Image (cartoon, rainbow, N blue to C red):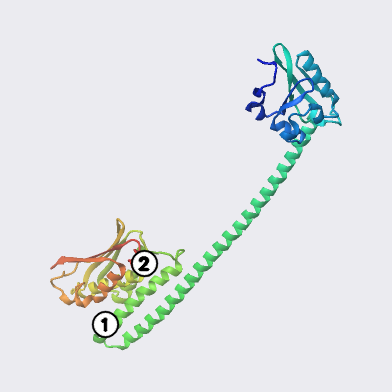
């Protein structure tokens, strides 16, 4: 197809933006000497030149050895008919111009210039070679990335293994320390038991209370040493162990007093577990001493979760508050330990009961430790 113009000159319209940004190498030449009117970026890269070095010069100076191209330019210019040319084999000279197409630029029925478009810049074998090289480089890069990923994965697995081993070592160390603490506390309990046997009954109550408190702490460390977790303590298991220890140390085999446990599966941090155990021990011991003057009755140890709090209830079906010595009631001066342990748990205490209906002590404390502001 011929390009038509309205004048016999080559106006600026041949230098329109579409030519400059065309993906194929393109140039416009004018006149019988085929001077370069415009040459786009793709063409300039193809022959490795600049716009200033190319524009205004005869096209043959850009291709001094390409006679076929110049002859075809003359033919298109003089005949006004488009033409194309493709070598069967890539020539040694002017290798960039082995396939191209030319269109005449017509004005007033005659050719005033020619548009040249290089249709292919590399023959199929060379394109295939370039593709193969690109594929090879891509494969090598992929191999490098895979190797790097494998190396990073191995390093990550090593670090994970080391961290897990460190966690196992820390767990074993904590359990070993807890086991040793428990053994040492058991030795102290045994020594106190020996003192109790040598002390008259009217003077031995202090030893008995101390023995029970230390035994409660020993049960905690025994529980930690046997657990697969050390960051928390299961209150239901801890409560049952405390009840078992108290029954063995404070109640005779023929006693009519029983200690029963009803507990949900709730965990507490080890730091507060000591205060919890001592609190349970103190309240249950208080009930054993004062709630059953006839020597029969039941003590209930209850733990349940209430929202974001834990509720501990120590209840008995004994004689009730009115029949007891007021100094022995929780919250009075005779039970300073109870107030201390409740405060350490960050909790609140409520006591209920009346004559003949027993006593119930409820303590609520946070499920999680809440740091107080500095």
User: Measured along the vertical axis of the image, is residue 268 above or below residue 94?
Assistant: below
Picture quarter with the N terminus: top right
**Left or right: 105 as drawn, with respect to 226:** right
Q: Please give the residue where the numbered disc 2 appears in the rendered image.
A: 238
Can see residue 51? yes
Q: Secondary structure at mark 2?
A: helix
User: Between marks 1 and 2, how big is the CA–CA gap?
Assistant: 25 Å
Q: Residue furthest top?
A: 109
Q: Quadrant of residue 219?
A: bottom left
Q: 368 or 42, which is in the foreground?
A: 42
Q: Quadrant of residue 267?
A: bottom left
Q: What residue is shown at x 63% (from left), y 28% (from top)?
A: 17
Q: What residue is shown at x 79% (from left), y 25% (from top)?
A: 99
Q: Residues within 10 Å of mark 2 (few under 14, many from 20)?
A: many
Q: What residue is shown at x 35% (from left), y 71% (from top)?
A: 274
Q: Please give the residue where the numbered disc 1 appears in the rendered image.
A: 205
Residue 368 pos. (x, y %): 35, 61
User: Measured along the vertical axis of the image, is residue 220 above or below residue 85?
Assistant: below
Whichever of callouts 1 and 2 sits on the residue coming sooner in the sequence is 1
Can see residue 1? no
Q: Secondary structure at mark 1?
A: helix
Q: 262 or 159, which is in the foreground?
A: 159
Residue 298 pos. (x, y %): 24, 67
């Amino acid at each position: 197809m011929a390009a038509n113009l309205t004048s016999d000159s080559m106006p600026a319209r041949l230098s329109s933006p579409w030519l400059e940004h065309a993906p194929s190498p393109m140039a416009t030449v004018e006149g019988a000497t085929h001077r370069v009117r415009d040459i786009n970026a793709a063409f300039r890269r193809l022959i490795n030149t600049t716009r200033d070095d190319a524009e205004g010069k005869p096209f043959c100076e850009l291709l001094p050895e390409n006679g076929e191209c110049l002859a075809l330019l003359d033919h298109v210019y003089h005949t006004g008919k488009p033409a194309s040319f493709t070598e069967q084999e890539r020539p040694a000279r002017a290798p960039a111009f082995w396939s191209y197409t030319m269109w005449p630029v017509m004005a007033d029925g005659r050719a005033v210039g020619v548009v040249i478009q290089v249709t292919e810049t590399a023959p199929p074998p060379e394109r295939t070679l370039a593709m193969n090289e690109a594929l090879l480089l891509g494969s090598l890069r992929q191999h490098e990335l895979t190797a790097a990923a494998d190396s990073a994965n191995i390093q990550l697995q090593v670090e994970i293994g080391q961290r897990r081993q460190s966690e196992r070592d820390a767990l074993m160390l904590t359990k070993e320390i807890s086991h040793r603490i428990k053994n040492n506390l058991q030795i102290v309990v045994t020594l106190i038991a020996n003192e109790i046997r040598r002390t008259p009954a009217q003077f031995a109550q202090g030893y008995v209370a101390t023995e029970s408190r230390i035994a409660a702490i020993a049960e905690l460390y025994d529980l930690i040493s046997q657990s697969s977790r050390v960051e928390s303590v299961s209150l239901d298991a801890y409560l049952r162990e405390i009840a078992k220890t108290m029954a063995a140390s404070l109640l005779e085999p023929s006693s009519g007093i029983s200690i029963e446990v009803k507990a949900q599966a709730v965990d507490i941090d080890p730091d507060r577990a000591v205060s919890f155990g001592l609190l349970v021990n103190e309240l249950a011991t208080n009930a054993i001493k004062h709630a059953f003057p006839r020597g029969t009755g039941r003590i209930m140890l209850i733990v349940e979760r209430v929202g974001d709090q834990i509720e501990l209830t120590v209840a008995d079906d004994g004689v009730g508050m009115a029949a007891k010595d007021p100094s022995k009631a929780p919250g009075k001066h005779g039970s300073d330990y109870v107030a201390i342990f409740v405060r350490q748990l960050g909790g609140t205490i409520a006591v209920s009961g009346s004559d003949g209906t027993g006593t119930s002590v409820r303590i609520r404390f946070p499920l999680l430790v809440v740091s107080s502001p500095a």
